[in-house]
Amino acid sequence: MSYSAESLKKMLILSQQGDKDAYKNFLMSILPLIHSIFSKKIFHKDDTSDVIQEILLSIHKALPSYDSKRPVLPWVLAISERRIIDYIRKVTRKNKNETLTKDGSLTSFEDEAKRSVHDLEILYKLPYDIRRAIELTKIDGYSTKEAANILGINENALRTRVSRGMSKLKNKMKADL
Amino acid sequence: MNDTKHLNFIDDLANKLKPVNVNWSAEKRTCFWFIIHCTWMALLMFAIKPFRYPLVHESHVFQFVFEATLFLVGLVFTGYFCFLSFVPGAIKSNKIKLSLIPVLFLIILFLYKIIFPSNTYSNWGWVENYITMRSFCEFEIMLYSLIPLAHIYYLIKKSIFINNKWTFICAVLSSSLIPAFIMHFACAYNYTHILIFHIGTTILMTLVATPVLFKIYKKSQ
């Protein structure tokens, strides 16, 4: 399905007025365009579908921002690009936290830390107040507010303890690798 | 499989569709924002201390009008580019920087006038300047600019798309240029004073408020 920029513009204006068919046609006609441009930029092919859905959702949310005096394609591409940038940032941030384990598989230190809190040997090397903060939030599943109440400290102090504890755990695990 | 998934998703979105209130254009927003804030600020400033009379010495009328126009162009440009950056694809982020040209030109002009004063101007108006000078014009500029800034921040929060930190720079700069523009009529007409206390305050506001506002925005995301 291919449309000219002018017909896309008409469809989008009708969509702003609540025309469901025009809106459906509009989304259907930009879908191949989004797919062709952005599928190359998505690192993991499994994520393509999710990212494209996020783009469609963003277009839906940004519908009031379209100015009918302006061309439609830059509007679509700018929204799509923003979602792609968000995706790339997310993936890059995740990759920064990943490292190779002994068996050669990729794992995130964050996930590893969460799994390893059960490993009492590592956990019990931490100071008592930090250990309790981690036990309550990561093992017992209390919310930050509840855990802070139990320990009689404020939420910010609890977050600091958990963050310090988790980073110490990560460092210990790194040393073990 | 994916195509079916997308088609179902599109169907869902289309079924949820309701008529939307289309956002005002950047031009309309800039006009509204400028007129509203200029009006209340001018009225308030006049109520606190009447504007100077005569506005300026006869031999400096053209010069004065030219500077006032530059102020106006600077604040309208920064405001317009800020609002334009809310519209996806309307402007590229590196082009937003162009809105700073009138402000830079204004600064250069005032610097030039201070370094190379005209022979009549340097002897004119010191008594008048002293009388017409507002005691706390820099604080007034800071205080008044907070309201247009809060307004524009509300619009930024409502908008799902903003370009980048240049949007915030333009927002703060144009908000603080409104009172600085009115001060051009309401406070002493002296280049050093205008450069340090009026334009300097807008620059200070931009340097301080932009990172604060940007951080608040990022935290709220």
Image (spheres, rainbow, N blue to C red):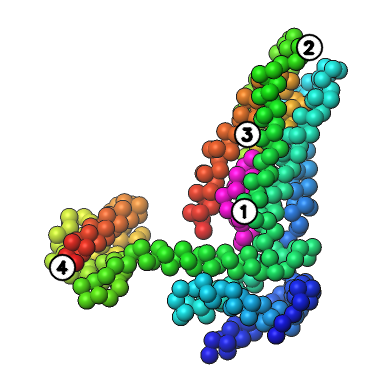
Would you name the residue on which mark 4 appears? A120
Would you name the residue on which mark 3 appears? B202
Q: Which numbered disc, 2 or 3, marks the residue that appears first in the sequence?
A: 2
Q: Which residue is rendered at x = 64% and y = 46% of the image? A: B97
Left or right of residue B123, residue B86 in this image: left
Q: Which residue is rendered at x = 86% and y = 17% of the image? A: B58
Q: Which residue is rendered at x = 74% and y = 43% of the image? A: B76
- The 10 Å Cα crowd at callout 1, few under 14, some 14 to 19, many 20 or more, is some
Specify the subunit that label 2 lies on. B
Q: Is mark 4 on a helix, strand or loop?
A: helix
Q: Is residue B220 above or below residue A73?
A: above
Residue B147 shows in the view: no
Residue B23 x/y as whole percent: 73, 61
Q: Do labels 1 and 2 share a chain?
A: yes
Q: What element carries label 1?
A: helix
Is label 2 or label 3 in front? 2
Residue B154 on the magenta span: yes
Q: Which numbered disc, 1 or 2, marks the residue that appears first in the sequence?
A: 1
Q: Do the residues labelled 4 and 3 touch (CB within 8 Å)?
A: no
Residue B61 shows in the view: yes
Q: Which residue is rendered at x = 58% and y = 84% of the image? A: B6
Q: Which numbered disc, 1 or 3, marks the residue that appears first in the sequence?
A: 1
Is label 1 or label 4 in front? 1
**Label 2 vs label 4: CA separation?**
85 Å
- Amino acid carrying label 3: it is Thr
Q: Do labels 2 and 4 share a chain?
A: no
- Amino acid carrying label 4: it is Leu
Would you name the residue on which mark 2 appears? B120
- The mark found on residue B93 in the picture is 1
- The 10 Å Cα crowd at callout 4, few under 14, some 14 to 19, many 20 or more, is few
